[in-house]
Amino acid sequence: MIPQTLLSKENGGDGDPLDVIILGPSISRGSVVKAHLIGVLKLLDGGEQDDKLIAIIDNSIQGHFSCLPKCLI
C-alpha cells in the first residue's frame, strides 16, 4: 500500500490506502521497496472503487524485460 493515498467513501473509494501488487521476489509485508509502476487494475469492491497498482521491484529479473509499444494497452 501507499501511505496517504486514501480515496474517501464520500468520493466513491473504499477509504483504504492504494494497494500495490509487486512483481518480483517475495518480500515481507510492510517492507519499503523501490519499484516501477507498469499498470493499474481498476476494480470495484462492493460498489466502491478499489484500484490496484502493478509494479516491478528495481533490480529484479522481471525489471530487465522490455515490452514493445504495442504491448502497452
Image: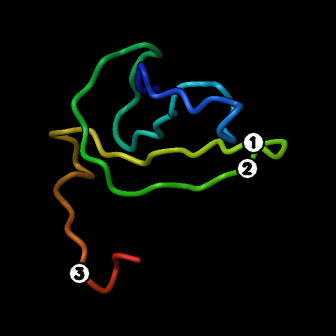
Check the image and report above or below for 59 versus 43.
above
Q: Amino acid at mark 2?
A: Leu
Q: Which residue is mark 1?
A: 48
Q: Amino acid at mark 3?
A: Leu
Specify whether 69 is left or right of 40.
Answer: left
Is disc 2 placed on a helix, strand or loop?
strand
Specify whether 51 is left or right of 38.
Answer: right
Residue 57: give x, y in percent of width and height: 26, 38
Q: CA distance from mark 2 to mark 3?
A: 30 Å
Q: Residue at x 65, y 25 (%)?
A: 15
Report crowding for label 2: few under 14, some 14 to 19, many 20 or more residues within 10 A (C-alpha).
Answer: few
Check the image and report above or below for 24 versus 67.
above
| Mark 1 and mark 2 residues within 8 Å of each other at the beta carbon | yes
Q: CA distance from mark 1 to mark 2?
A: 5 Å
**Label 2 or label 3, whichever comes before in sequence order:** 2
Residue 62: give x, y in percent of width and height: 27, 52
Residue 16 badge: none
In front of the other: 9 or 67 = 9
Is disc 1 placed on a helix, strand or loop?
strand
| Mark 2 and mark 3 residues within 8 Å of each other at the beta carbon | no
In front of the other: 6 or 29 = 6
Q: Which residue is mark 3?
A: 68
Is disc 3 placed on a helix, strand or loop?
loop
| Mark 1 and mark 3 residues within 8 Å of each other at the beta carbon | no
Q: Which residue is mark 2?
A: 44
